[in-house]
Amino acid sequence: MIIADLATGTAGLHSDRIRPLGVTSKTRSKKYPNIPTLDESGVPGYEVNTWMGFFAPAGTPKKIIARLESGIEEALKMPDVRERLEGLGMDVRSGSSDEMRQVLASDIAKWSKLVHENHINVTP
């Protein structure tokens, strides 16, 4: 058994050696719409998403941040870049640094709660 992001699992999904049981997102994958969500498969409320983001050091001037955001958005609009990422099963989108902060805050709250409620020790 493996739980992996779709980009990692794509090669296996194209073989006859594994059988996908579900995706961990709230909605079905655009690339693999026949694979049900784990929620649909009997694990209600289960949602784990992977994402990639770009980060800059704290205190980076807003003008530089705006230029980086613009460049990333421009790159993600390029058909060859978009096709390559979507071909790996990624849901491609671009957002602002404020949106990235919201994603981080949401994930920190979600996983902190899980760690606290289950008395998980995360120190090395």
Image (cartoon, grey):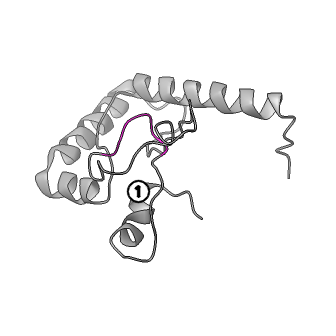
**Residue 117, image x, y percentages:** 81, 28
Residue occupied by mark 1: 6
Q: Residue furthest left?
A: 79
**Residue 59, image x, y percentages:** 52, 29
Out of 26 and 42, give the one closest to the viewer: 42
Left or right, 85 with reference to 7:
left
Q: Element under label 1?
A: helix
**Residue 113, image x, y percentages:** 73, 26
- Look at the image and give the residue range highlighted in magenta: 24-29
Q: Residue furthest front?
A: 42
Rendered view: 21 above or below 49: below
Q: Residue at x 44, y 34 (%)?
A: 26
Residue 94, located in which quarter of the rendered image? top left
Q: Residue at x 46, y 37 (%)?
A: 40
Left or right, 24 with reference to 122:
left
Q: Residue at x 39, y 60 (%)?
A: 7
Magenta stretch prevailing secondary structure: loop
Residue type highlighted by circle 1: Leu
